[in-house]
Amino acid sequence: MEMSQNEKLDAARYIEADQAHVWHHLMQHQSFAGKGPMIAVEGKGLRITDINGREFLDATSGGVWCVNVGYGRDRIADAVCKQMKKMPYYAASGGNLPYIEFAERLTAYMPGLTRVYISNSGSEANEKAYKMIRALAHIKNRPEKKKVLYRDRDYHGTTIAALSSSGQQERKEWFGPFVPGFVQFPHACCYRCAFNKTYPGCDLDCAKAVETTILQEGPETVGGLIVEPITAGGGVIPPVAEYYQVVAEICRRDGVLLI
């Protein structure tokens, strides 16, 4: 991308302003000393351009995997612009047409599920799921059935409850005390098996550990279990094919909602 002389001259000012006023999450700010962070200014397709005119292939989809359709999609931008002018927002205590249309189309791909709650982030979505579990415990007159199990190595968000249910200790350091009611069970990484066994002769102990954890806590106290379908930040770990069949059956048997 060709940059104007004014844009090039502005680069130093923006870097200085960034270092003075912006708090970058997950980063040691001292690593920016003397050079500042990479500042993205434009994207097209899979490529982004920084404030110095350098072009990069974005293999991380926006840095956190949330621009999967690529940058500069006119059809999406035009649709968003049109809706922003017509009705930018209304609380979900009422209805709005895009929400209704999206929910209707999404549930067509979700056999057995009929309703959709839209949130702003994964952390918020998981927090809402935890609140649903606790609300359901009261509705069914089982107020003690509120605990949520989570898997070692899995990541579920940066809010305090979502972080409490994440199995990545390096992300948790410094941020305790955490919310009570969340219990960890072993990971499903065959390469470093928590049970020192080798698949397929392992009897799927990693999946059966869910049942062990539920029994240890008391089935009457466990209301939910949350997992990343494929552990992402904890190592990109897809469990073996039979894993979720076993886990789902355990959850059904013990009345535990699987998130």
Image (cartoon, helix red, strand yellow):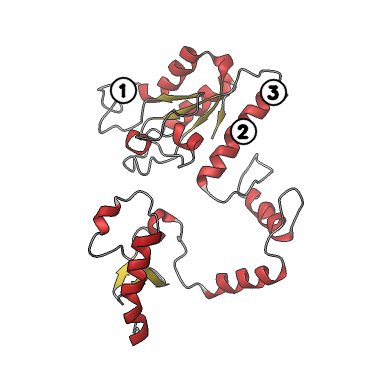
Q: Quadrant of residue 37?
A: bottom left
Q: Residue placed at 65% from the left, 46% from the top?
A: 116
Task: Work out how far the residue at label 2 is from the one at label 3, CA to CA, in angstroms.
Answer: 11 Å
Which three-letter amino acid code belongs to the residue tagged 2?
A: Lys
Residue in the image at 62% along x and 72% along y: 81
**CA gap, disc 1 and disc 3:** 39 Å
Quarter of the picture holding the N terminus: bottom left
Q: Position of residue 169 (x, y in %)?
A: 34, 33
* Residue corresponding to mark 1: 202
N-terminal label among 1 and 3: 3
Label pair 1/3, CB-CB below 8 angstroms: no
Q: Residue 138 carries which label?
A: 3
| Quadrant in which the C terminus appears | top right
Depth order, front residue of 53/12? 12
Q: How many numbered dots are placed on residues in this image?
A: 3
Determine if residue 204 is in view: no
Residue under the image location 62 percent in, 33 percent down: 131
Q: Is mark 1 on a helix, strand or loop?
A: loop
Nearer to us in this view, 95 or 189: 95
Question: Residue at left 33%, top 68%?
Answer: 15
Residue 41 location (% of width, % of height) = 40, 72
| Above or below 198: residue 51 | below
Crowd tier of the residue under label 3, counting other residues whose Cα lies within 10 Å: few below 14, some 14–19, many 20 or above: few
Of label 2 and label 3, which has the lower sequence position? 2
Q: Which mark is residue 131?
A: 2
Precedes in sequence: disc 1 or disc 2? 2
Give the farthest residue toward the left: 34
